[in-house]
Image: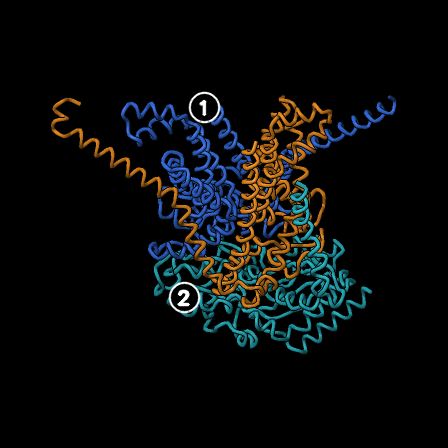
Chain colours: A blue, B orange, C cyan
Amino acid sequence: MELDLHKQFRVDIKEHLVKFVFFSFAFLSVITTVGIVVVLITDSAIFFSEVSFFEFFTGTRWSPTIRPEEFGVLPLISGTLTFTLVTSLIAIPTGLLAAIFLSEYANERVRSVLKPALEVLAGIPTVVYGYFALVYITPMLKSFIPQLSTFNVLSASIVVGIMIIPTIASISEDAMRAVPNTLRHAAFGLGVTKFQVTTSVVVPSALSGIVSSFILGISRVIGETMAVTIAGGNMSRMVNWLKPGETLFEPVQTMTAAMVEIGVSDVTGDSVAYRSLFAVGLTLFAMTMVLNMVSAYIKRKYREKY
Amino acid sequence: MAVKDIASGAAEDNIRKERIKGIVFQVFCVIAALFGIVSLGALLIYVIYEAAGWLDLEFITNTPSRFAEKAGVRPPLLGSAFVIGLVALFSLPLGVGSAIYLEEYSKQSFFRRFIEINIANLAGVPSIVYGLLGLGLFVSTFGMPHGIVLVGAFTLTLRVLPIVIVSSQEAIKAVPDLQRHASLGLGTTRWQMIRTVVLPEAVPGILTGTIIALANAMGETAPLIMIGAATTMFTSPHGLFSSFSAMPLQIYAWSDFPQSEFQHGVTPAAIVVLLIIILSMNGIAVYFRNKFYQKKRQK
Amino acid sequence: MKKILAIALIAVIVPFAVFAGGEQEEAGEQLSGSIKIAGSSTVYPVTVAMAEEFSKLHPQVEIPVQSTGSGGGFKNFFIPGKTSINDASRPIKDSELEAARANGIEPLEFQVGIDAVTIVVHKDFPADTITIDQLAHIWRPDDPAQKWSDVDPSWPDIEIELYGPTSASGTFDFFTEEVVGEGGASRSDYQGTEQDNTIVQAVSGSKGASGYFGMAYYLENKDKVKALKVNGVMPSIETAKAGEYVLSRPLFIYVAKKELIRPELREFVRFYLERTDGEIVKQVGYVPMTTADVEDYLAKFDEAVADVQ
């Protein structure tokens, strides 16, 4: 009996050890979040002691490496918003209509081919998309938009739009498929067309999932880096939305592209420019975090219970 | 509808209008569904066409060169393989372990929700921010040299971990409770039960998620730029502390070269190599996913 | 399940085996190590070419090279001791020299060639030549020209789009000194980059665009952009060598003296210096050194090596 007790004790220790090890792995995720926040905040704090909050958040000139050095983040935010807006205008309607097709119109066979095909769009690395935009799409667009600049918003938006379609389509489709068929049948029973069923019954019922997919897609576009760095150019400017030509056809620098520009040249520096990297990163992190939380909230709170 | 409307044929007109609206709408939906696929298809065909003359065995074995004819991708290819191999090595135990803890050991509590929300948030953080984490933590704070294999691997592991955890969780959740109870009823310990019953069942699902995450990691560029990886290296990395380059970094560097042999020859070839690797990995993942569903169906 | 684990394990182990095994076979000499280099984007193609050739003989030596600008390279890499060599398209400044010495780093200067800073415009630009004064009118910080016609009424009445290096660049320092008259004085509304290829891309795509960089980038892309004669002289290896081209300047590498105890660095620097009078520099697009100069620099190098050993 005593031998058994010893063995039991050893086994117990082992079980507790295993549980503790796995717990610490899971806790690593919390440490990672803390790490991100700490890294971003500490370097940003030093930055904000050198460059005032006011200058950073209201300045309209971003120029970390060209004298006179100025660190106004508004051009970068303007660039990010512009790029995100144009990309969303491409991706959201397309993604939604594609989701409607997959959920309401396509048969099982078509779905089994289309869904994986759409996933491929999301699997292509953004650096490749950036290359496509610069080397294939821009020259093609130039042939009928002669005033198009070599680095411009439109080409980058098109490719990133294509890349984001699966995100919107897949989540929206899941939301729509979750709408029970009884609702559809009831509507048909009232003599309503398929188009009306889709637009008046299914989409509104799935709205929370659909809207949350839009917000998630937007959040991804805000964080998108390489395509817009390669094809969008390095010129930070305040975008004038009243002039669509100027908005779309000229180069733009988003927050992410500006971070790459600094990262490529100033990796080890002890300079204001190096620290501005973290200030921009913090702003970016805050924006995407808020959007992700809003998206999750909408999905949870407004979910129709059937 | 008044009788006079029906009689005047207004009803039929309406029905026809509705039908046309319905058909037009459906057409738009089909176009939307196909737009992305067709556009990407065209781009892929074009890049393969341009890569055709340049992609040969020499391309894979040569080092990058300022001469387009001699350019090759061996160092970045090996760099990518090395780093992703390490990421797999690090992320599998950490990810699966975390998932095991969440699914098998922890109870539904505030703390568990907290960790899960955390992980969901981390999955949505842009990858460039992970690059900043790598830079600020590993390079600046821990003082590791910039641009070495180990730092790249650590950074990408953190990036990939949330995805591995979530897909492992799904796979583990799918193992029927009946099997767990049966095993515990026979007197196994919790860990024995996990090791012998749950994990083997969950492996295909785990592998699916992990391989897809690794395929994404192969295409990651921004985090590696932030931690100081070189965009062009002539030598392949030999060890954990070697400087390295990676395929997407080399493509990024070459995308800047305006000479037409590069823009329409070498760079497309490099892109095709990278895409073949990524799409194969996705294909393998799909294979595992099908096996996973087969097993489920057998139950 | 075991089979899957085995496959997964192999998939991870194989890359390791490939490295450990693959690279060894070619090592003729056992030189190994890592030589980190950063600095001028102008000198970058020369250093990269030298690194490429050197790697063929010594594949175990890693030579990562970054294009950060001469000033950026000094400040962020060379002075803090993170690189052993800094490429520079201008001489080291006194302040940089002091800062390096304060950090225990003694920079050794070696000239590796002569560059002709080239002004480029779109291929269809109607003019062929520009004067220094006109360049100053375009690039000066106070009230610079906005349209080409402001500079010369016969030129197109379109907006000037400018591209050029940032203030981390030696080319920037040189250009502003020579053209505007004061180092660092430049208008700030242009697109700045240390990747000169980006400048080529941008200028080739836009009729009103112009930029400036080292001659190598022009010679490599003659079919994409047009070079303007400066004061009537076309930039070329001959005109730069003869001193006829106004915007010509020497190119340097700076080596951290104490690092010369490393055999791989010694071999590389010697390899580099020996070839600065030859085809590589010329093929990249700069004026090579004369053999006499190379001998002088090699002597200086040998002396430094003797000092540290």
Label 2 SS: loop
Q: Nearer the viewer, residue A5 or C19?
A: A5
Alpha carbon of mark 2 to alpha carbon of mark 1: how far? 59 Å
Say what secondary structure mark 1 lies in.
Answer: loop
Name the residue rendered at 61%, 70% in the picture: C113
* Rendered residue at 81%/66% (across/down): C307
Q: Chain of mark 2?
A: C
Question: Would residue A277 appear left or right of A199 to someone viewing this image?
Answer: right
Q: Nearer the viewer, mark 2 or mark 1?
A: 1
> Vertical placement of B166 versus C131: above or below?
above
Say which amino acid is labelled 1.
Answer: Tyr
> Relative to C32, is A171 above or below?
above
Residue B178 sits above or below residue C34 on the image: above
Which residue carries the number 1 mark? Answer: A302
Mark 2, residues whose alpha carbon is within 10 Å: few (<14), some, or many (≥20)? some
**Residue B98 placed where, x, y %?**
66, 33
| Dot 1 alpha-carbon crowd within 10 angstroms: few under 14, some 14 to 19, many 20 or more | some
Chain letter for the residue marked with disc 1 in the picture: A
Report if residue C219 is visible in the image.
yes
Q: Residue at x 60, y 64 (%)?
A: C43
In which quarter of the view is residue B90 placed? top right
Label at residue C161? none
Instruction: Judge left or right: residue B73 versus residue B31.
Output: right
Residue A168 image offset from top left, x and y in percent: 44, 37
Residue at numbered disc 2: C123
Instruction: Answer left or right for C18 relative to B167.
Output: right
Q: In this picture, is C290 found above or below B80?
A: below
Q: Position of residue B183 (x, y in %)?
A: 69, 27
The quarter in which the C terminus of chain C is drawn is bottom right
